[in-house]
Image (cartoon, rainbow, N blue to C red):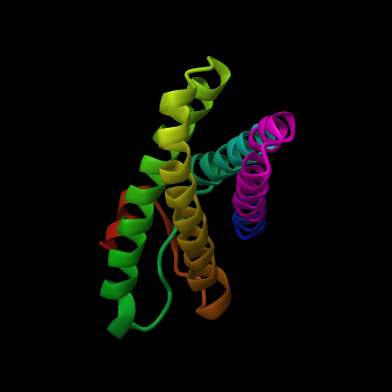
Amino acid sequence: MATFLPFISTVFIGLSAVFVAIGWYFIGERKIEQHKKAMFWAAVLASIFFITYLSKTFFIGSTTFGGPEGIRLYYQIFLIIHIILATIAAVLGIITLVTGYKNNLARHRRLGPITSIIWFISATTGIAVYFMLYVIYPSGETTNLFRAILGG
């Protein structure tokens, strides 16, 4: 279960990014209804990611970096950048969705491309974190969230 939930959450955030890309394509083609549906599913998939991520964090704990000590600092910097981008992407994602659904299209058009780019970077770095924690290197111990991030 400790490695299954991170795998599932990583799949969902990856699929969310794919649906954002599909939505971006549809809006470029002026297919508004398809754009709305793709972005709706991107938000649903991102929400499932968040639920599975929180479930693992609360019920099991967070995994520390188990890779070589010589790259731990680089991993921690990468992880902190990912966390900052993911937080910004989540907030912008909610704002962008709300502006779209409320037909505040001028603001939606300004935020959409910025949000999408940050979302892609966040999803990509999240997938990279998953690979560093569970695939490339052996997993570290399971501990609380802050200790896993800071390595203390």
Kindly give the residue lying farthest to the front in the view shown: 30
Kindly give the residue lying farthest to the top in the view shown: 102
- Where is the N terminus found, in terms of image quarters? bottom right
Residue nearest the viewer, comparing 115 with 87: 115
The region drawn magenta spans 11-39
Residue nearest the viewer, comparing 77 with 62: 77
Residue ID at (31%, 58%): 81
Residue ID at (47%, 18%): 104
Residue nearest the viewer, comparing 82 with 109: 109
Q: Is residue 32 left or right of residue 61?
A: right
Q: Quadrant of residue 90?
A: top left
> In the image, is residue 143 part of the stretch drawn in magenta?
no
Q: Position of residue 116 (x, y in %)?
A: 49, 46
- Where is the C terminus found, in terms of image quarters? bottom left
Q: Position of residue 77 (x, y in %)?
A: 28, 65
Looking at the image, is 102 positioned above or below residue 115? above
Q: Position of residue 11 (x, y in %)?
A: 66, 55
